[in-house]
Image: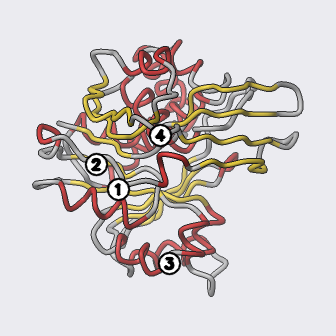
Amino acid sequence: MSLLVTGTIGIDTIETEDNRADDVLGGSAAYFAVAAGLMHPVRLVAAVGEDFPESFRQVFATDRIDHAGLEVRKGSKTFRWHGRYERDMNNRESLQTDLNVVGEAPPKIPDNFQDSKYVFLANTHPAVQRSFVEQLKSPKLKVCDTMDLWIKEFREDLLQTLGVVDGLVLNDSEAKLLVPDESDLIACGRNILGMGPKFVVIKKGEHGAMLITNDVVYALPIFPTDKVKDPTGAGDSFAAGMMAHIAEVDKVDPATLKRAMAYGACLASVTIEDFSLAALRAADRDTVQKRFEEYRRMLSFD
């Protein structure tokens, strides 16, 4: 079943305690598209500037990613981000963010993409996310991401967007920011359900992720790896694995969501093992499936 992602594509500079990667491919939609493409065909909608390298565009030129919705905008510059991670990789500092094309009018969803059934609205302004929803004909599942900036500065816009989506993916600090009167994540999730979504997935970094619906609370650990080089894009890859599995089986129920989160954990674990999208590009479906089977054995109590 058709899977669509909208979001940012950018040029990143990433620093860790031990390494640095300059001017590498990044952005929420880039990570999502490449990660999801390992499991299921994906349609990509995003805008970049005329400075976007051809070698980066070729990353999306595969039979698993339909990038007809990738707009190269003349006279504009590509979104850029420069960040630095602390030693434990759990915290990062944004040193510079240049919105560039992301600060302009959003790209249009191509006519032949408007019948997409499964849609992930990766991190961007909530009003822009809502405008994408309005272009779709009859999606079966709409899931969005968000961040602290939108929660703090554009709360009313975000609440309107939460009223038209089926699911929300966010991290633990963002959940507490969205529900400031609660410190317990389960209580935060249940409060967010009252804002519109049918389910909430709260990412907890190295402590895994939690699914909350009206009937289910479910927690998963991360897939363990000792090769952490760059956490950038791990959350987007998690969402990609989750949405790709849902689109593949064409079902949305608690059992499917749980299994989808497991695939998300496996894809996130691949992403963090190298800078930018290098580890994802070196992987294939067999890589993901082997990790999934190992993960399932790890979690079994039999």
| Residue located at (73% from left, 29% from top) | 228
Name the secondary structure under disc 3: helix
Name the secondary structure under disc 4: loop
Lower position in the chain sequence, tag 1 or tag 4: 4
Q: CA distance from mark 1 to mark 4?
A: 29 Å
* Residue 76, numbered label: 4
Q: Which residue is mark 2?
A: 119
Instruction: Report if the CB atoms under discs 2 and 4 are less than 8 Å apart.
Output: no
Instruction: Report if the CB atoms under discs 2 and 1 are less than 8 Å apart.
Output: yes
Amino acid, disc 4: Ser
Lower position in the chain sequence, tag 2 or tag 3: 2
Residue 155 rendering spot, x and y as whole percentages: 50, 78
Lower position in the chain sequence, tag 2 or tag 1: 2
How crowded pointer 4 is (Cα within 10 Å; few <14, some 14-19, many 20+) is rated as some
Q: Which residue is mark 1?
A: 143
Q: Nearer the viewer, mark 2 or mark 3?
A: 3
Q: Which residue is mark 3?
A: 155
